Image (cartoon, rainbow, N blue to C red):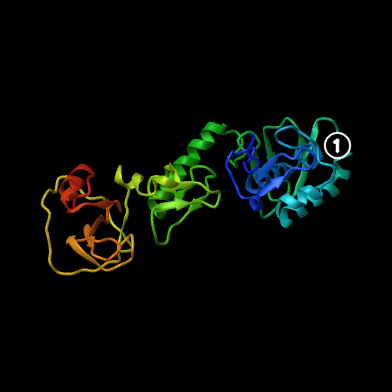
Amino acid sequence: MDDKNSCQICLSKYSIDDLHLFPICQHVYCKLCLKTTYEQSIREQKVQLKFYACPLCNTQIVDNKWIQNVVSQDLYSQYCELLIKQNLIEYLVDDEILVGCKNQQCSYQFMIWKHADNQKCPVCKQQHCRKCNNDHQIGISCEQGQNLREVSYIEKKKKLHISRCPKCKVLVEKIAGCNFMTCKCGTYFCYQCDQQLQKEDHHKHFQQNKCITLLNGKQINPIVKEQKKFRIISVFDYIPCFFCQGVTEPLIEKLIYQCNSEKCKGLCFCTQCLCQLRKDDIPYHLESLNCLQK
């Protein structure tokens, strides 16, 4: 790429402070992409410098100080510990490798046959599949293990009301706030259906399906389509405007509100899908988007 501010991995543009300029070849990468790549190599116990070469042209780095510049201090300490253990690797036969226990509470290092499908830690006894990188039992295929984990997650989601990032699979529990989630890995997704979203889908996703949204800070159930009578009320039940935080007037109780602030000037909005409305469009909106109130 010709753009000197574009990452060669994710192809996104960044400010100069968020970029790494690779030594020698001068290729540019965003800090997150290069950090993620190096962290994966360290977790896989790859300590040779060839595993930290330029991802684009494979130019080698001259020493491990560059690695220290990219990853966190804790992970770099793990890398240094792996370097020290290279003495153990010198005594391995050709068909053996040194691996680490996947149990974060253990992390014991031990040797296994390099073509083994599974590994079992001699200390904590945890078994781990080296094909799919999961801890299902030996004798169960990766596909069966995935199915069992999926069934277990569905049961947990129903019982505990949790969600799971569709990219990194980390489990999350929402205490309050919007159902549009942002994972630590940078992925956007819906808390209700776990669908991966784009940043611009913040409102669009909830307009097109029945995922639960928010009403005055509380979750409300999807509105049934069959109800077609709209009760206009005159009693004021103020909630903050979603767009300017000003005082609002309810047009349809707990559903359609109007903001008469100087900024919004009579703007209406739906608390079910959070979209802006003109007053004349309210009946059509309620029928076409299933935002009807019981």
Name the secondary structure under disc 1.
Answer: loop
Q: Is residue 272 left or right of residue 169?
A: left
Number of callouts: 1
Horizontal and vertical percent position of residue 71:
71, 51
- Quarter of the image with the C terminus in it: bottom left
Position above or below: 143 against 266: above
Task: Name which quarter of the figure residue 251 lies in.
Answer: bottom left
At x 80% / y 40%, what residue is drawn? 24
Position above or below: 80 against 51: below
Is residue 101 visible in the rendered structure shown here? no
At x 43% / y 58%, what residue is drawn? 174
Quick one: label 1, few (<14), some, or many (20+) residues within 10 Å?
few
Is residue 142 visible in the rendered structure shown here? yes
- Quarter of the image with the N terminus in it: top right
User: Mark 1 — residue?
Assistant: 92
Horizontal and vertical percent position of residue 69:
75, 52
Along the viewing direction, whichever of 85 and 165 lies nearer the viewer: 165
Q: Is residue 274 left or right of residue 194?
A: left
Horizontal and vertical percent position of residue 67:
76, 48
Along the viewing direction, whichever of 140 and 249 lies nearer the viewer: 249
Horizontal and vertical percent position of residue 189:
44, 46
Along the viewing direction, whichever of 103 and 255 lies nearer the viewer: 255
The amino acid sitting under disc 1 is Leu
Q: Is residue 277 left or right of residue 4?
A: left
At x 48% / y 54%, what residue is drawn? 172
Q: Is residue 223 left or right of residue 129?
A: left
